[in-house]
Image (cartoon, rainbow, N blue to C red):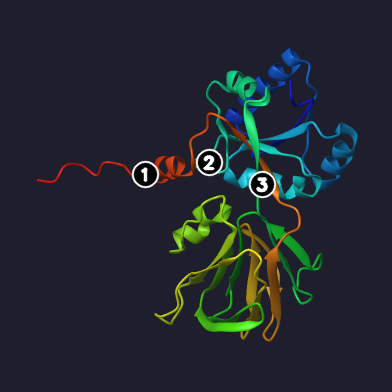
Amino acid sequence: MHYKHILLYKGKETDKIAEATRTIKQWCENHGVPLRKVSNQKNVEKIAKESGKKTVLLSLGGDGTFLRAADLIAPYCIPILGINLGKLGFLTGLDSSELAQNLTRVLDKGSSVRELTRLQCSSDSIQSGGSSVFTALNEVTITRGTTAGLAEVELYLDSKKVATYPGDGLIVSTPTGSTAYSLSCGGPLITRNTSAFSITPLNVHKLGLRPIICSDETEISIKTNTPVSIQIDGRNIGDLEKNNSIEIDRADTPTLMLVPDFRSNFFETVRNKLNWDKDRGSRI
């Protein structure tokens, strides 16, 4: 067995998650592999130090659960295998069907580890009451939040002004996040092996402003002309007042995702999840 320690991070408690947890527990007992549940940063830090390198974390739920697990585990370079019990499951490598059999296929060297770029954003002016540095696997979103009227922000790439954006805000997305919120707002798909970020305007009130693709080595700065709210992977982290800024670039540590050898390729996943090839019916 390639992995000697298994960590388990679960989403909301449901009958499906309880059943899958029992399957995973039985599988670990049958293979003599320790299983330890984690739920917060302190759990992960302690166990990561004790378990050494041959450790994998199983994320049991949907894409939201995977994102939360990725946030917990990112500093420790432990790979994550997502088991989908949600709706879409873009980030998950396995479905719950034939779970025990597929765990054997994946964890017995039937997989590869893929590095997923993370974003790092920082601002000394974020009114969060806590840290001023955050990382994200999918996206950083700057929105008008509960502020009445338009948000107005200025975008700078490598210290050069791009444009002023009056509207609902901006989404800065990784390739992983390009299939999430950014895509629903008209952003482009970025293939997993592309070293790039996308910047997608939210309901901008200038028709000429379109999504931008930039290198993931670009230093992105967003300055506020109105108060805004900041979300990291859909989680609100605080607000920025007028005349402040937030800096965004590539994080030093990526998320490591365990990818089954038998999993479909990127565009096959896109076709299946987004119904790109779905027959709309015959034309009369």
Q: Is residue 149 left or right of residue 19?
A: left
Q: Is residue 17 left or right of residue 32?
A: left
Q: Secondary structure at mark 2?
A: loop
Looking at this view, name the residue that lies furthest to the top: 30
Q: Is residue 238 left or right of residue 82?
A: right
Q: Which residue is mark 1?
A: 275
Q: Amino acid at mark 3?
A: Glu
Query: Could you tell me residue 55's position as x and y percent?
Result: 78, 32
Q: Amino acid at mark 2?
A: Gly
What is the C-alpha distance between the residues marked 3 and 1? 26 Å
Q: Categorize mark 3 by other alpha carbons within 10 Å: few (<14), some (14-19), many (20+).
A: some
What is the C-alpha distance between the residues marked 2 and 1? 14 Å
Residue 125 badge: none
Query: Could you tell me residue 95's position as x and y percent?
Result: 54, 30
119 w.r.t. 38: above or below: below
Q: Which residue is mark 3?
A: 115
Sequence-wise first label, 3 or 2 = 2
Q: Amino acid at mark 1?
A: Asn
Sequence-wise first label, 2 or 1 = 2
Query: Could you tell me residue 70's position as x and y percent?
Result: 70, 46
Quarter location, residue 258: top right
Q: Which residue is mark 2?
A: 89
